[in-house]
């Protein structure tokens, strides 16, 4: 068979196998297939063969048009997938660091009109071109660190015009650079100042005006809501999500991050694809998510950056059979980090996940969390040729080193897009 690209001689080629239909949960969360001295062959944008170097080279024909990349002594993984980001926003919030160090709590900064609301002002004021230019810059940083697909939320507009502008910017960023973005409408991210004290009236606007436009112009696949004390209650979250589901969107929830309101149970009740954050999830929430197959998207970089004492109970969730994915939550306030490699370290050290569990959480399970498990997230025949070569002798090394970008090359849709 013909190949346009061969990546050969990987010390380890690491992937899940056979999990394209359903995410990995329980004991399977940590199950990986490792080809020692592995290779992968690609034709166009698709993988056509995976296995040991000897097997792959025997199966494929190479010609003058075949590009051969030698991954000698390095590790090859599927392109990393970041299933929770807020990558399009205006401005930045380094000025909040001082407040944070004085001990002002995150929700208190928001209640004073800062936090998310300060990014809302900057996002509303920014012309769309500026949002697009920043979004491209952030995506290229992600790509250089091994991320080939990411979810991208709106939620710093909080007016019809600025929410639509944000989602249009997401679409433009998606087509302007290699990282694929899966768009999520998060109009219910906070109550904007014009509606202060009247969240229900703001939700009328979200439901009656924003959602129909988002759906009409096909601007989002998912609808999300920030279900949190002082933001939206479970009842209000249910209302937005039910309306979105009726209009054909799939669902995600920022759930049980700071105060345990029952967002995880709501995700299970509504058949959400994922519930995200989950620092303070209770036993009932865990049980319900496992029963309904809701993916837990855990964001330990945010826990680290908010200096919360307790991380999400990842081990409990895995033991209960909840499929776990991990993401950066890249945003201007609670997580100004867009590097999934750092999430590998934090997840191992503070969630006590094994390197194998973490790799599945940022590849195949993350693919399922953005609805693309059938096309990406593993190195298997027929899947998109998205892969990363890391300057590491084995995959444990990725969890051991931290703070250095270990990416050597990134291949997206069969094309070499990053070469160090
Ligand atoms: O996912 N939790 C709510 N939203 C974001 C933070 C937004 C911000 O602080 O700007 C999050 O952590
Ligand atoms: Fe978030």
Image: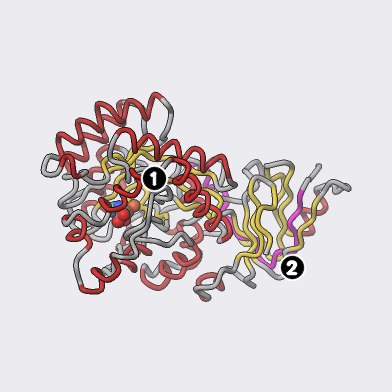
Earlier residue among tags 1 and 2 = 2
Find numbered disc 1 in the image and state the secondary structure of the residue it sits on. loop
Quadrant assignment for the C terminus? bottom right
Q: Is residue 237 visible?
A: yes
Residue 11 among those drawn in magenta: yes
| Quadrant of the image occupied by residue 220 | top left
Write the start and end of the magenta stretch as one range: 5-21
Residue position for label 2 = 72
Q: Measuring 43% from the left and 59% from the top, which residue is drawn there?
A: 27
Q: Residue furthest right?
A: 64
Residue position for label 1 = 126
User: Left of 260 or right of it: where is 8?
Assistant: right
Q: Residues within 10 Å of mark 1 (few under 14, many from 20)?
A: some
| Residue 157 image offset from top left, x and y in percent | 32, 42
User: Left of 236 or right of it: where is 163?
Assistant: right
Q: Is residue 277 visible?
A: no
Quadrant assignment for the N terminus? top right
Camera-side residue: 257 or 54?
257
Q: Measuring 69% from the left and 52% from the top, which residue is drawn there?
A: 416
| Quadrant of the image occupied by residue 418 | bottom right
Camera-side residue: 96 or 392?
96
């Amino acid at each position: 068979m013909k190949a346009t690209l061969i990546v050969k001689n990987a010390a380890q080629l690491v992937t899940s196998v056979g999990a394209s239909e359903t995410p990995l949960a329980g004991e399977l969360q940590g199950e990986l297939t490792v080809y020692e001295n592995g290779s992968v062959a690609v034709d166009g944008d698709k993988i056509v063969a995976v296995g040991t170097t000897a097997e792959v080279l025997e199966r494929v024909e190479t010609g003058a048009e075949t590009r051969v990349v030698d991954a000698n002594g390095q590790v090859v993984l599927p392109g990393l997938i970041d299933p929770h980001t807020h990558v399009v926003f205006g401005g930045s919030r380094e000025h909040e660091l001082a407040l944070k160090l004085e001990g002002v709590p995150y929700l208190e900064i928001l209640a004073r009109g800062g936090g998310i609301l300060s990014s809302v002002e900057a996002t509303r004021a920014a012309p769309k071109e500026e949002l697009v230019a920043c979004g491209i810059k952030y995506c290229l940083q992600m790509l250089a660190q091994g991320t080939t697909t990411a979810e991208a939320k709106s939620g710093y507009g909080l007016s019809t015009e600025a929410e639509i502008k944000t989602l249009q910017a997401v679409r433009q960023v998606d087509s302007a650079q290699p990282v694929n973005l899966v768009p999520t409408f998060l109009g219910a991210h906070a109550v904007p100042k014009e509606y202060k004290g009247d969240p229900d009236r703001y939700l009328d606007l979200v439901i009656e005006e924003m959602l129909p436009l988002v759906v009409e112009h096909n601007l989002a696949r998912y609808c999300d809501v920030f279900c949190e004390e002082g933001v939206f209650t479970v009842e209000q979250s249910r209302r937005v999500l039910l309306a979105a589901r009726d209009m054909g969107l799939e669902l995600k929830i920022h759930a049980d991050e700071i105060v345990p309101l029952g967002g995880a149970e709501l995700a299970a009740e509504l058949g959400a694809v994922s519930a995200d954050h989950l620092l303070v999830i209770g036993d009932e929430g865990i049980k319900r998510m496992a029963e309904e197959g809701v993916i837990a998207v855990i964001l330990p970089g945010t826990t680290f950056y908010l200096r919360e004492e307790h991380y999400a109970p990842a081990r409990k969730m895995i033991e209960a059979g909840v499929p776990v994915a991990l993401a950066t939550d890249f945003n201007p306030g609670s997580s100004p980090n867009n590097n999934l490699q750092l999430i590998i370290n934090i997840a191992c050290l503070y969630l006590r996940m094994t390197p194998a569990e973490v790799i599945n959480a940022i590849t195949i399970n993350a693919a399922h969390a953005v609805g693309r498990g059938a096309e990406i997230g593993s190195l298997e025949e027929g899947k998109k040729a998205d892969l990363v070569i890391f300057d590491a002798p084995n995959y444990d090394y990725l969890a051991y080193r931290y703070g250095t970008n270990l990416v050597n090359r990134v291949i997206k849709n069969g094309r070499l897009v990053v070469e160090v």
